[in-house]
Amino acid sequence: MLPLVLLPAMPCDARLYRAQLEGLSDIVDPEVKILAQESFAASAELLLSQVNGRFIVAGTAYGGCLAMEVLARAPDRVAGLWLMNCNPGMHPDPAGVRVISARIRNGEQAAVTQEFAERAIPPADTLSRAMFVQMARDCGAALFARQSDAALTRRDHWGTLALVEVPTLLIWGAADTFVPIEVGRRIAGILPDARYEVLPGCGHFPSMERPEATTAIAREWLLDRFRGRN
C-alpha cells in the first residue's frame, strides 16, 4: 500500500489524526510524523530520509506548510497531496511569531495554548478545544517553541503549487480564523487535479473537529485517485 504521511499542526500529535489512522488503514499505510527541526527545510529533509519511495503527504496548518516544503524539495517522491487549513505564503507576522516563541519559553505555554484554542476552534466545540489543549500540554513547551521558531523559515510556495500535477485534496474548516476558506479556494483554482471540500462550522483542525466527514472525504478521494496504484 502507498504510505500516507500525516503531518500535524503545531503543537499537536497523532491524536489529531486518530480517526484517519483507523479509517484509512485498509487502503493506505498511514503514519504520523511530528517534526520540529530548526527550519522547514531541515524537517522536510528529515522526513524524506525516513520514508522510502513515493508517498502521499498530508498536513494541517503547520503540517500543511511542511507538506508543501516536502513537495518542493522532492516532487518525484510525492504521489499525492492533502492539505488542510494552511497558507502557502510566507508567514504574515514574523514579529508576532517571535513574541509567541518568547512567551512559550518564558513559562506562558498554557496561556498561549488557550489563546490558540480560542482562535482556532469554535467555542461550541469544547471537546476539540480540550483535546488541543491536552495535546499541546503533552507535546511540551520545548517542541512548541521550536515549531514556532521554524514557522519563520516558511517559504512562499504559491509557485510550487502552480507546478503540481499530482492529485490534491483540500479540506477546509469554514470557521477557521487563521486561514480562511478563500485561501483553499485559491489553491484549488491553480491546481489541475484538486478536490476542494469546505466543512461548515469547522475551525482550524478538520481531522479532529469533523473526524467522520474528513475521513469519508479522504477515503473517497484515495479510492478514486489511487485505486490500483498500491
Image (cartoon, helix red, strand yellow):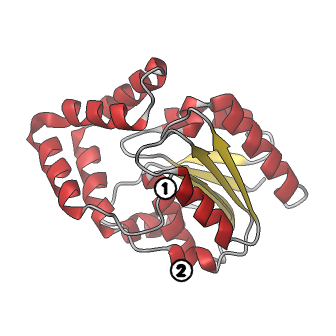
Q: CA distance from mark 1 to mark 2?
A: 15 Å
Image side of residue 103 versus residue 193, left or right: left
Q: Position of residue 218 (x, y in %)?
A: 73, 45
Q: Residue 6: percent from the left, percent from the top?
A: 57, 49
Residue appearing at x 40%, y 48% in the figure: 178
Q: Amino acid at mark 2?
A: Gly
Mark 1 lies on residue? 86
From what the image shows, is residue 112 above or below residue 186? above
Q: Which mark is residue 159?
A: 2
* Residue 78 appears in the rendering: no
Q: Is residue 86 left or right of residue 211?
A: left
- Residue nearest the observer in this picture, 102 or 139: 102
Give amino acid for label 1: Cys
- Residue pictured at 76% horizontal, 37% vertical: 216
Q: Earlier in the sequence, mark 1 or mark 2?
A: 1
Query: Which quadrant of the figure contains the C terminus?
Result: bottom right
- Is 42 displayed left or right of 201 in the figure? left
In-image side of 158 versus 228 (left or right): left
Task: Tell whether label 2 touches label 1 (CB within 8 Å).
Answer: no
Q: Nearer the viewer, residue 228 or 8?
A: 8
The crowding category of the residue bearing disc 1, from other C-alpha atoms within 10 Å (few below 14, some 14 to 19, many at least 20), is many
Determine the residue located farthest toward the front in the rendered image.
182
Q: Residue 226 is drawn in which quadrant? A: bottom right
Name the outermost residue toward the left.
106
Residue 34 at x, y = what percent?
A: 44, 48
Q: Residues within 10 Å of mark 2 (few under 14, many from 20)?
A: few
Asked if residue 25 is positioned above or below residue 100 in the image, the reply reads above
Residue found at x 85% / y 61%: 229
Label 1 SS: loop
User: Visible in this render: residue 207?
Assistant: yes
